[in-house]
Image: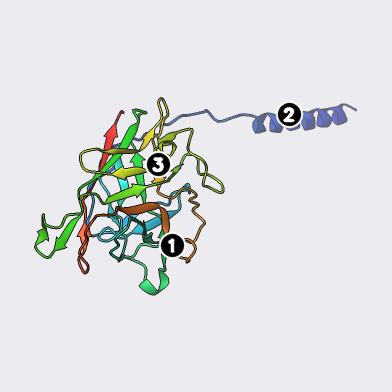
Amino acid sequence: MKKATLLIGTGLLASTFVLMSQTVNAEDVKTTGEVSFTKGGGPVDPDKAIKLVKPGTKEKVIYLNQKTEGTSTGDDLRFSFVPNIKFGSVKVSSVSERHPALPLEYTEKDPETAAEAENPKFKIPPFVQVIDETGNKDGFEVKAGAEVFKVKETTGLVETTDLQNTRIEFTGQTLRNTLLDGGAGDADAASMLAGFAAEGSQFLVPSNDVVIMNSKTDVDTNASASSSVFQADYKHTIDYSTPDNIKMKNVLLNVPAGERPKAGKTYVTNITWVLEKGV
């Protein structure tokens, strides 16, 4: 009996030792992770396409030709895009006329790396986009004004036959912000941004800048892109190249009766876009 008891006891002791070995933990140790952030923005390369987030989406990237469609600026609070506004060829008229603008053209792939045949062009209404990478919530305001339309000559802008009363007219807009545009996108940004829509039509005139868009008081737009699309019912899913949508009904060239444009001449205006911080 003693022998049996000893053997059983040894077996129990061995089992206990194994259990204790399995529950002993190694010593915990900690390390660190570290990053420092530098100022956003940077120099703009005028020869490269403008890369930005399509208005109404969270992060869908599109590309616009900087030589034909518009331009951008640097810095941590910047214009990621401001448009050239084109009206094409219109007829001289003895009565007042309002001519719709043409849509902008963009691609979904970088034209520098994608073959042209594999990178189709799409249309979108003219828009302004502001990127805020300031790291604070000072806010911003966008204004715009335009000079008198003048004849475009090969030697530059001349002072003769100016269209003193012809104006670019904005009659509607859609506001978007990438912080809101998750999921299906096209979220109403009225909680973050204000525009001119509530005040009716706005005309771009010399020496009197119009407020296009501004962030609301105490709203944080940091690390986001805010857009004002000059189309009252804009949706990022709409094909603006179709006959029903290609005319930009909320961006108009207002030519009053009495203006005397010369047939066969091209007229141009310089549009000044102003972005102010902390307004």
Q: Residue at x 25, y 54 (%)?
A: 258
Q: Which mark is residue 246?
A: 1
Q: Residue at x 36, y 53 (%)?
A: 252
Q: Which residue is mark 3?
A: 226
The secondary element bearing badge 1 is classed as: loop
Which one is nearer the viewer's eye here, 33 or 205? 205
Q: Quadrant of residue 196?
A: top left
Image quarter of the N terminus: top right
Which one is nearer the viewer's eye here, 258 or 44? 258
Q: Which residue is mark 2?
A: 16
Residue 118 is at least partly visible in this image: yes
Q: Is residue 36 above or below residue 108?
A: above
Amino acid marked by disc 3: Ser
Residue at the far left: name it. Answer: 155
Left or right of 88, for residue 179: right
Q: Nearer the viewer, mark 2 or mark 1?
A: 1
Residue 52 is at least partly visible in this image: no
Q: CA distance from mark 2 to mark 1?
A: 82 Å
Q: Is residue 89 above or below residue 101?
A: below
The percent position of residue 270, horizontal first and vertical second, equals 21, 51
Amino acid marked by disc 1: Ile
The percent position of residue 232, horizontal first and vertical second, equals 46, 47
The secondary element bearing badge 2 is classed as: helix
- Sooner in the amino-acid sequence: mark 2 or mark 3: 2
The secondary element bearing badge 3 is classed as: strand
